[in-house]
Image (tube, rainbow, N blue to C red):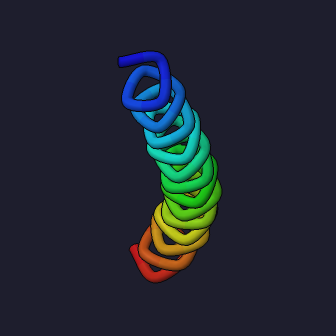
Amino acid sequence: MESEKADLLEEIEKLKKAGEEKASTLEKEVATLRKEVESLKELVGSLE
């Protein structure tokens, strides 16, 4: 029983770490997209 508990806790930690890494990657992608949107707004604004 203790062995199963330890295995589950280890798996939870791995999943938590993977989730945090994915969240971090998504945050970086969102920041990049926001910069691209701002650049496009400036470009469109200069064309008007």
User: In the rendering, at what x and y percent does residue 33 appear?
Assistant: 50, 64
Name the quadrant of the C terminus: bottom left
Does 17 appear above or below 43?
A: above
User: In the rendering, at what x and y percent does residue 1 appear?
Assistant: 35, 18
Location of residue 8 (image quadrant): top left
Residue found 47% across the figure and 63% down from its top: 37
User: In the rendering, at what x and y percent does residue 2 appear?
Assistant: 47, 17
Does 34 appear above or below 11?
A: below
Which residue in the rendered view is the most extreme toward the front? Answer: 1
Does 19 appear above or below 31?
A: above
Residue found 47% across the figure and 37% down from its top: 7
| Left or right, residue 4 beside residue 6 | left
Residue found 37% across the figure and 30% down from its top: 4
Residue found 54% across the figure and 78% down from its top: 43
Foreground residue among 14 and 34: 14
Foreground residue among 5 and 36: 5
Does 29 appear above or below 46?
A: above
Number of numbered labels in the structure image = 0
Foreground residue among 21 and 43: 21
Foreground residue among 13 and 2: 2
| Left or right, residue 6 beside residue 5 | right
Location of residue 15 (image quadrant): top left
